[in-house]
Image (tube, helix red, strand yellow):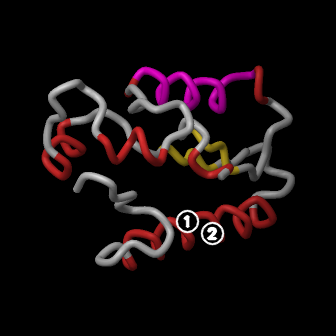
Amino acid sequence: MTGSTAGTLGDPGFSVYGGTKAALRQMARNWISDLKGTGIRLNVLSPSFVHTPAYTDLFGEAPDGVPASVQDVVPMSRLGTTEEIASAAMFLASEESSYVNGIELFVDGGVAQI
């Protein structure tokens, strides 16, 4: 899928995928109101292209390690790592984010910002 941004806005064949992401974001907006006063925080973590076995199954392995689709779309010009996603999740689960509630944290190399 060289040159594709598969899974992003307007990609053919990804309408259900995109719709479920939007639904989860909206549910989080509603749930923070439902959970008011409970001390429970709810945030959304939104990664983009991350090097996982599923990514390799979908896009294949690039000879140089960075698929052209990522170089074209991700401002950081690389895939994210599972460790980077885990670090963001750990931040949201920690006391360091104790006043963070209802956000969508993009861990995507800048994709959502362009």
Residue 55 screen position, x and y as percent: 24, 44
Q: Report whether 50 appears left or right of 28.
A: left
Residue at left 54%, top 22%? 87
Residue at left 78%, top 46%? 101
Instruction: Specify start and end residues of the magenta stretch as a single range.
Output: 83-95
Residue at left 76%, top 66%? 34
Query: Which residue is identified by label 1?
Result: 24
Give the quadrant of residue 83. Answer: top left
Specify the quadrant that holds the N terminus: bottom left
Residue 103 screen position, x and y as percent: 74, 49
Query: Which residue is identified by label 2?
Result: 27
In depth, the one of 65 and 84 nearer the eye is 65
Compared to 11, does 91 lie above or below?
above
In depth, the one of 103 and 55 nearer the eye is 55
Is residue 91 highlighted in magenta? yes
As drawn, the label of residue 83 is: none
Give the quadrant of residue 27. Answer: bottom right
In depth, the one of 91 and 55 nearer the eye is 55
